[in-house]
Image (tube, rainbow, N blue to C red):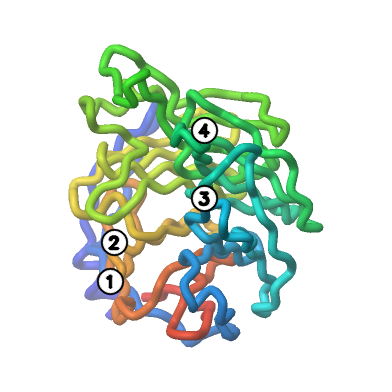
Amino acid sequence: MTELKSLRCLVFLVTLSFLSALVPVCPAEDLEFSFPEKSVSFPAEIAAGMAIPRWIHGRMVSVWGHLDYRDPRANVHVYDSNGRKIYEARVWPPQATRVSLLDMAVSRDGDVAVVGVANDSSGQPAYFFAHIAPSGKVSPPVRIQPFEGQRATFGPDGTLWILGWELDHLRRFDPSADHATLRQFALDGKVLGEFLPRSSFGCPAPQHPALGIRGGRPELLASRDRIIVLSGFCGQVIELTPEGEILRRVSVPDEELLPPFAAAVTSDNVVYIKRHPTSPMCRLQLYDGSCVDIQSAGKYTLIGAEGEALVLQNGSALEWRRAVE
């Protein structure tokens, strides 16, 4: 079998900046999931109607996406690796009558951040992020407008990265006004860096790299040594260093591939995506934007990764499985 596979390999010249090398390329074969390395019960309150949770750095976080002032419930819930609740918290900016939480992130030290939008009694939106300490204490929300954050992740150094957009006074994308779509924040709200101007994506207004399409949303992921942006409307995958330097920028040939319904990156920088709620899962090939399907993955919901294993929802359980050939 090994000899047959070797005969099917092609050798071609790949040129990267300042380097040329002969690289053997084998036809991609479908993957399959290993037996579960671990399984825990899925918390009942999440199954009862909260947003799909995310598993990041040994914590599972789930939010109520939309609450108004008449609903006194906590809107952030954090669980440990055994499915036990660590704490619940209520993030509520002053004068808000409605709060929508759009994304959440967890740092390696257990800090949680949520990005969202608060509306006052007149309906005016105010975009913000809020930091929650490992103890569950909520810091005052930080308003970041005119930037409107949609996705968030913690970098390896504990800074917060947010993907989003700016609109004009009529809440439209102004084709003549460029802005950074990716920004790095300290937890006190200080802007540490601005990256990826909208114009660099090359997709015309009203398209925007932080917009969702076909039921999916853009994704912002982080590993131990990089930041990864998956833009659906602009069909690009971008890898950056924690300092914001672009390592690789690839156009995705399959327009149905992005934005994904869910995505995760493993400790060895392998990206997996779920295209739609009932579609197969696949491993995204970062060198050319193609995807290798994982057999029998349609029944699972991808909620994150731990080490080289994916964390999957399977009915009322969470399972840790690897994708193997």
Sequence-earlier tag: 3 or 1: 3
Distance, label 3 to label 1, CA atoms, is: 27 Å
Distance, label 1 to label 2, CA atoms, is: 7 Å
Q: Are marks 1 and 2 in contact (CB under 8 Å)?
A: yes
Label 3 or label 1, whichever lies nearer to me, is 3
Sequence-earlier tag: 3 or 4: 3
Sequence-earlier tag: 3 or 2: 3
Three-letter code, disc 4: Ala
Secondary structure of the residue carrying tag 4 is strand
Distance, label 3 to label 2, CA atoms, is: 22 Å
Residue 323 horizontal side relative to residue 134, left or right? left
Three-letter code, disc 3: Leu
Q: Which residue is mark 1?
A: 280
Please state the horizontal and vertical placement of residue 78, each as a whole percent of the image.
66, 65
Label disc, if present, on residue 275 of the rendered structure: 2
Please tell me which residue is depicted at 74% across the width and 43% down the height of the picture: 139
Residue 160 position by quadrant: top right
Within 10 Å of disc 2 (Cα), the crowding (few <14, some 14-19, many 20+) is many
